[in-house]
Amino acid sequence: MNIIVFLLLMAGLFFFTGGCIGILRFPDFFSRLHPAGKLDTLGLMLTMTSLGLYNFYDFSLGTLINGCKMLLIMVFVSLASPTATHAIVDAGVRAGLAPWAKGDKRR
Amino acid sequence: MDNVFLFSSVYLALLMILSLYRGIFGPTVADRMIGVNAIGSKTTVVLVLIGLMYHRLDMFLDIALAYALLNFIAVLAASRFFQKRKGLYDES
């Protein structure tokens, strides 16, 4: 059981690392939104799953309520993160930011 | 297992500093919003890890849920504000 929790936590941290490197390294605002949206949903979901499994080591009413709260956070983030990403890209498109083309300077 | 949680939260704090680079030096306002959003989603996980380390998970889960809500509202309000104000522009 410990091994499953550890592996899920490390997978979540791996996705957080990948998203962070993507935010730093991508050349453009529109392409930077791609790792940003992935980091929120996938990294937070894997990490929360591992912590929820660790929470259920001793089963009682309190840990059941904690698990429900963790599930609430996961469901809320899976709804809210794409919405926030879409709001940012909508603001960028309406402001007229030009997408990056091959050969341009990296911004 | 407490040491694993401790080192994971320290590592997440290092990743937050890396994302803060995009928040400070991002060429447009939207880049800064991306960096702040990434920092907020990492903070939610760090709060739950702190709660597991201190054995006060019930309290820290409420704080994490409130922080996730606040992060979402902040990013949505900032993007709507800059869309209305036409404050976004290409600085390059």
Image (tube, coloured by chain):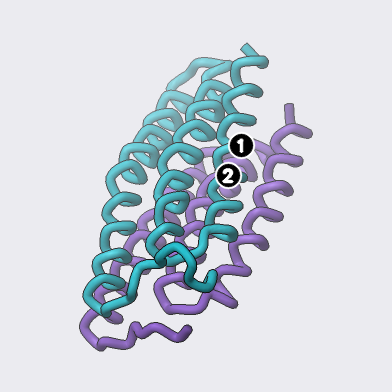
Query: Which circle marks residue A18 in the picture?
Result: 2
Which of the pair A4/A53 is nearer the observer? A4
Label 2, label 1: how far apart the Cα atoms are: 6 Å
> Which of the chains bears the disc numbered 1?
A
Q: What label does residue A34 carry, if any?
A: none
Q: In the picture, residue A38 is in which quadrant? A: top left
- The type of residue carrying mark 2 is Gly
Residue ID for mark 1: A14
**Of all residues shown, which one is farthest toward the top?**
A1
Mark 1: few/some/many CA within 10 Å (<14, 14-19, 20+): some
Q: Is residue A78 left or right of residue B8?
A: left
Q: Which chain is cyan?
A: A
Residue A78 or residue A36, whichever sits in front: A36
Marks 2 and 1 in Cβ contact (< 8 Å):
yes
Q: Colour of chain B?
A: purple
Q: Nearer the viewer, residue B24 or A54?
A: B24
User: In which quarter of the view is residue A10 placed?
Assistant: top right
Local SS, label 2: helix
Query: In the figure, A87 relative to A83: above or below?
Result: below
Q: Callout 2 environment at 10 Å: few (<14), some (14 to 19), or many (20+)? A: some
Whole-percent x and y of residue A32? 45, 59
Identify the residue at horizontal 37%, vertical 32% (top origin).
A71
Q: Chain of mark 2?
A: A
